Image (cartoon, rainbow, N blue to C red):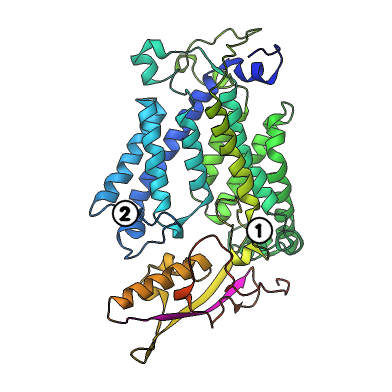
Amino acid sequence: MNTKPHSWWSRAQAPIDTASLIVFRVVFGLLMCVAALRFLWNGWVHEFYIQPTYHFTFYGFDWVQPWPGWGMYVHIIALALLALCVALGFWYRWSIVLFFFGFTYLELLDKSYYLNHYYLISLLSALMIFLPLHRAGSFDAWRNPSLRRSSYPAWTVWILRLQIGFVYFFAGVAKIKSDWVFHAQPLKTWLAARSDIPVFGFLLDQSWLAYAFSWGGLVFDLTVPFWLLWRRTRLLAYLAIVGFHAITGKLFFLGMFPYIMVGLTLVFFPPSWPRRWLPASWFPQAPTLKHKIASSKPWPKFAVAALGLFFLVQVALPFRHHGYGGNVCWHEQGFRFSWKVMLIEKTGYLVYHLSDPTRGKKWSVYPRQFLTPIQATMTQTQPDMILQFAHWLVRYYQNKGHSKVKVRAESYVSLNGRRRKRFIDPNVDLAKQPRGWAPKTWILPSPTETPP
């Protein structure tokens, strides 16, 4: 493959300092270790995976089930240890592969606990499997000197920047909606609920502040990846990221997400930046990079195709909801895995009305009779979970001797402060509706009224 010195391929292969990627690996590993330990500390292992009698698996992944007994505790502890190994670069390849599968398994167990940054962690750990982040500043490089590299190819940084940039940019695209832009919802509702904060809490009940936050968040998400790429605005953009996540983390209880974004966005700084702020002994000797061009040995075609498909899918997923029509914030078809962050405030009411014509019996079931409080709350407003649980109820009562069970849902939902509106067609027998990605015609149209 013949390329000119300044072609994209030569630039992608050009050597860069290893320092920033060492920090990226360490920060990622330590944050993931803390995240796993938080699950143990807060009792979430039992609450999320052991206590529930039913789990809302993702379509096509019904075979993913929790470990029995103490297995889930062992799994979380193993994730914490694997994350620590990633940070140290200890058996890095095995550690990051096992972490990716272990964390993604955890994410697939129950969609009730889906968070956008869980999805991001799976994506980043998948990418890190193929990045040579253990060849410098790691236990592996110390143990096996033949692995050591004084530089990395530039594409390793490009890929990580692109992945993190996607989060911000598509979160901004998702905010281009009338509720967010013209009505400052759901921020108006959320900020007013936090008006009891001392000193400046009274400001949070002001309508103008909600609009300022909405428009500011939209512009911030759409543009901050580009400001980070420009040398002259990079520091200011990063300080904005720190302030943005500090405020939103304090106001909206976003867990580890602010720390993850603040820590990992450091990868946008020049590759040698850690040498200015951290002890030189923490890093290998800085390579002489001036005028050097790394080997332009081409990647295997399947690797290029796989990487292209990896990012192409991420570009397509945020727009797939257009194939369903209507308001995605209402019907939520195509909502997950699309970086639709902080767009909806939904409350609901749900009761199932079941009948067995063969025995002439009718009865009602509330979700909390079988589900945990978190699961029941999420089920009230998410159509795929309403359907999934209806199918479980059919199986449950068939095992109780009811051979032909019909299930109808009495469901009402409020979106972004509007009055509650009927959500599911009450005349449809959900027992006969298939799961899948086909449009759910039994979801009633979204409300047309403007939010308060």
* Location of the C terminus (image quadrant): bottom right
Is 192 rendered above or below residue 77? below
Residue 333's spot in the image, x, y percent?
58, 61
**Circle 1 — which element?**
helix
**Circle 2 — which element?**
loop
Amino acid carrying label 1: it is Gly
Residue name at image x 63 percent, y 8 percent = 292
Residue name at image x 67 percent, y 43 percent = 169
* Precedes in sequence: disc 2 or disc 1: 2
Q: Nearest the camera: 49 or 257? A: 49
10 Å neighbourhood of mark 2: few (<14), some, or many (≥20)? some
| Magenta region, residue range | 402-415
Is 307 rendered above or below residue 177? above
Circle 2 residue? 66
Residue 375's spot in the image, x, y percent?
42, 65
User: Main SS type for the magenta part?
Assistant: strand
Question: Is residue 302 rendered to the left or right of residue 340?
Answer: left
Amino acid carrying label 2: it is Pro
Residue name at image x 28 percent, y 75 percent = 399
Q: Nearest the camera: 99 or 304? A: 304
Circle 1 residue? 323
Question: Is residue 388 rendered to the left or right of residue 292?
Answer: left
